[in-house]
Image (cartoon, helix red, strand yellow):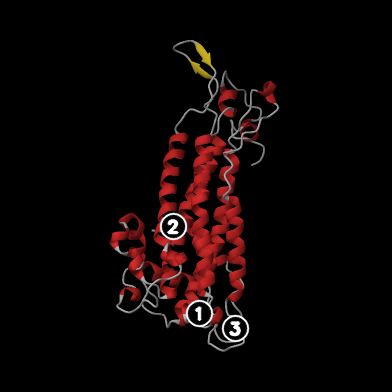
Amino acid sequence: MLGSVGMADLPANADLAHGALDGFELAAKEGLALLDHNAFSTGLAALALVDATRLLDALDVAAALDLEALSANLTILHPAVGSRKVDRLRALLHGSYLWEEGAARNLQDPLSFRCVPQVHGAAHDTLDFARECVTTELNSSQENPLVLLDEERVISVANFDAVAVAAVVDFVRIALAPVLTSASERVVKLLQSPVTGLPEGLAAESGLAESGLSEFGVPVQAFAAEARLLAQPVSIETVSTSQHEGIEDRMTLAPLSARRLGQMVELGERVAAVELVVAAQAIDLRGRPRLGAGTGAAYAGVRRLVPATGRGEAPPQDLEPVRELVRSGELGP
């Protein structure tokens, strides 16, 4: 996983080839074909994009459940906003109590709630673009030199430069960062009585000397903060190696870009798990109103794994089962 600067994944490819083909006698050019390409970076990026897509689908569901937990104003999902941005959320909330007259508590909710269509829509558009770019790279030649049999020539090229992969995965991390930041902010808002009209910390009752789920506001902000730090672009690095008298004077760091997206997704899964549990508690305190088609299924899935926190009870001690629910893809479309 370490040691490649993204200008042909030589260390990683050599390690993989040695493990798979040690002792196997290679024919002409097969050594070059095994080593001199960015298949490791490209494959790692492709897998990370699949995981990121699954996470964003789950975060869509969690955000929709947040809207019900807050009794939010659904004018933000008016078709005039743009179908691409609101269709997914409207489908998740189909049949929800929030569509009823007077269900909204506020004319304007906090921006982390109001801006869900725009923030999530931008991330979905970015992922679509990234998948297209990585698909192209998966089907492209990345070798150097090129052997042109028809011309009986070997030509020096730079197809090993994986900036297309590195930059587009950087883009995904940048787009995912505000999604996770907004999710963590919604969690904090749901734990605040002045914002929700519910007991402080979503305790079972008002006036109790109990913190409810307040403690979850701390780790969710830590997860989001670490995720933001991973969003720093790496494809801007242009550092020389010591090889070939300075000829190798740029790098893409494509493996690092892909690896950071994988780490960001893992943190995002934890953000989503906290978000779902907190939103489900708020739903319970609102008397379990009629939920949407998608959000209702998500609420039921969370409650199968984590019970509501009642009076005198400690908050859930293990959210890994909810994280596994997020990771499973069951919350997706």
Q: Amino acid at mark 2?
A: Val
Dividing the picture into quarters, in which one does residue 219 lie?
bottom right
Which residue is most to the bottom? 207
**Residue highlighted by disc 1:** 194
Residue at 54% from the left image edge and 75% from the top image edge:
191
Tell me how far mark 3 sits from mark 1, CA to CA.
23 Å
**Residue highlighted by disc 3:** 313
Quadrant that contains the N terminus:
top right
Question: Counting residues from the N terminus, which is met first, the one under dot 1 or under dot 2?
Answer: 2
Which is nearer the eye, 319 or 29? 319
Dividing the picture into quarters, in which one does residue 313 lie?
bottom right
Is residue 256 visible to us here? yes
**Residue highlighted by disc 2:** 119
Residue 29 in picture, x, y percent from top left: 56, 20
Mark 2 nearby-residue class (10 Å; few <14, some 14–19, many ≥20): some
Residue at 43% from the left image edge and 64% from the top image edge:
61
Image: 330 above or below 166: below
